[in-house]
Image: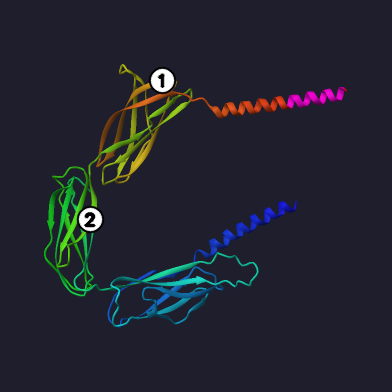
Amino acid sequence: MEQKKSVLNIFLLTIIFLFMINIVSSLGLGPAKKEYNFEPGLSEIITYKVFGVSSTKNLAISVKGDLAQYVKFDKDKLIGPGEFAVILELPDKIDTPGKNKIYISVSEEFDEELAGTFIGTAVKVNAVIYINVPYPGKYLDVDLASHNANIGEPVKFDLDLISKGVEDVTAYPKITVISDNRILETLVFKEREILSQENIKLRKFLLTENYNPGTYTANAIVLYGGDKPATSETEFKIGELIVDIINYSKKVVIDDKTQAFSIEIESGWNSNIDDADAKVVFLDSFGKVVTEFKTTSTDLIPWQKKSVLGYFDSSNFTEGFYDANITISYSGEEQRKTSSEIVMVEFIKKPFNIMLLVYVLVGLIFLIAIIFLIWKFVLKKRK
């Protein structure tokens, strides 16, 4: 009885523990991120809000990171939700170029002497301050983003250029479009003057009328007077209105029960496709139809993979391989289209259920044991 009570107490404490974690885990801190370009003697006051915590909770405020020594607080503790100020005072020079990170932390405090305190449930939340310190000389950071499109639609490229050096730069950006390690086209931008710490955003469009559907690579290459060009790479897709079969049930068990047949399909289109379903026709070695059925229907968002299911009676099949003609039917741009593929499916006999045999043997042994005990008990009574 005592053991049962102990187990129950542990269970209840675990539930309370998880409940407490759920309550405290909502502690929040904002703003989550601030970013500044370094200026000698830069001074900023940032007001932070603490929320999602009970009004009696003791909270500690702290700082760590690359430039933590240049941060002060108007207070280092809070009770419950509230606000505090971070005073950021940077020196005239910082010797660590790049993105320096300062972490502002708010964490719960527990009284370790208080009975019933849950050890290890303290929650800590962080906010980050980025200080972008220029590199010596010329330094350009490049980021290229692309967007998928359908054949005949333009592909949009967004190019981000950030001058992170102490010197201004003259940039000569271009984008090369590549397929199978071959440059298909080059998009050239105008020459750009970019000041130190300046960030500019550029855009170009690629016309796709003469392109085939598929996946392509785009490389941004920017000459700016640095030791080597600044580069960035991305992939994009040009789609066509097609749904491809990428997988299917390759083995089917011959059984009296209805069997499921799964087909995984994938959209090659950069727009929505409606009502995609499949018709499956099984043929024997003479090309005669054994059975046919349709699958469930589904909608596809751009480039999505999904499975559709169909059900059929497999009892008319014998062991061996059968051809399955799978025809996918789907709608897009107010037209109904189909795509087909003939695949091979193996039909196999229902495998022997070894576990069923084990259960039967265990049951027999158990039954024999009961009969033996009853027989022994009857003999004993007769004596």
Mark 1 surroundings: few (<14), some (14-19) or many (≥20) residues within 10 A: few
Q: Is residue 380 magenta?
A: yes
Q: What amino acid does circle 2 point to?
A: Glu
Decide if residue 293 is in sight here: yes
Element on which disc 1 rests: loop
Residue 47, numbered circle = none
Q: Residue at x 14, y 46 (%)?
A: 209
Q: Residue at x 30, y 78 (%)?
A: 94
Q: Which residue is mark 1?
A: 319
| Camera-nearest residue between 333 and 204 | 204
Q: Amino acid at mark 1?
A: Glu
Query: Residue 233, which numbered label?
Result: 2
Q: Is residue 346 magenta?
A: no
Q: Residues within 10 Å of mark 2 (few under 14, many from 20)?
A: some
Image location (x, y in percent) of residue 30: 41, 70
Region rendered in magenta: 370-382
